Amino acid sequence: ALKASAFASNLVVPGHEPKSAVVLLASLEDGVGGDAFRSEMEMYSGMEPSRVIEDLKKRAKLGKVTEASQKPNRLALDDARTDFLVVSPKAPAAVEQLLAKTRIRFFRAIDEALGSLDRRLWERDVAVLPHGSSTVPVAA
């Protein structure tokens, strides 16, 4: 699911006011992923994005990053350009609890997520990403 949000964050309008938003619709029925991902997300959950990047650079120099480290890194890099929202009616409570510790807003229904957005965002282009991590985003 994170791959799809990374594709979408490449489509946002830099410097847009209000900040662009990426709404990720994903089942997330399998939970938050592996222990490494959960650990990385929890480690950086309360940090400002600039501090996340700084810490990850230090860890990289020490050879202490994992394959899961790229996920909080990407989210931190994209934070200045976009807000992330996740919509999943089927996600277990563990997903909602983990995301509650982060800057990612979680919703059970698409109407709630879309209703939380600044109405001015609807005046610009809207990008729709089809299902699948290797698909190409479609902009409308």
Image (cartoon, rainbow, N blue to C red):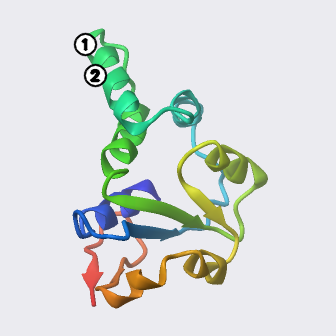
- Residue 115 is left or right of residue 119, and the answer is right
Give the quarter of the figure containing the C terminus: bottom left
**Snapshot quadrant of residue 5:** bottom left
Q: What's under tag 2, amino acid-wise? A: Lys
Q: Residue furthest right?
A: 93
Q: Residue furthest front?
A: 17
Provide residue 78's location: percent of width, then percent of height: 32, 51
The structure residue drawn at horizontal position 30% and vertical position 86%, both measured from the top left corner, is 124
Provide residue 94's location: percent of width, then percent of height: 73, 47
Q: Which of the labelled discs sits on residue 61, or is there none? A: 1
Image: 51 above or below 112 = above
**Snapshot quadrant of residue 14:** bottom left
In the picture of the structure, the residue carrying the numbered disc 2 is: 57
At mark 1, the secondary structure is: helix
Provide residue 45's location: percent of width, then percent of height: 56, 36
Q: CA distance from mark 2 to mark 1?
A: 6 Å
The structure residue drawn at horizontal position 70% and vertical position 53%, both measured from the top left corner, is 96
Q: What's under tag 1, amino acid-wise? A: Lys
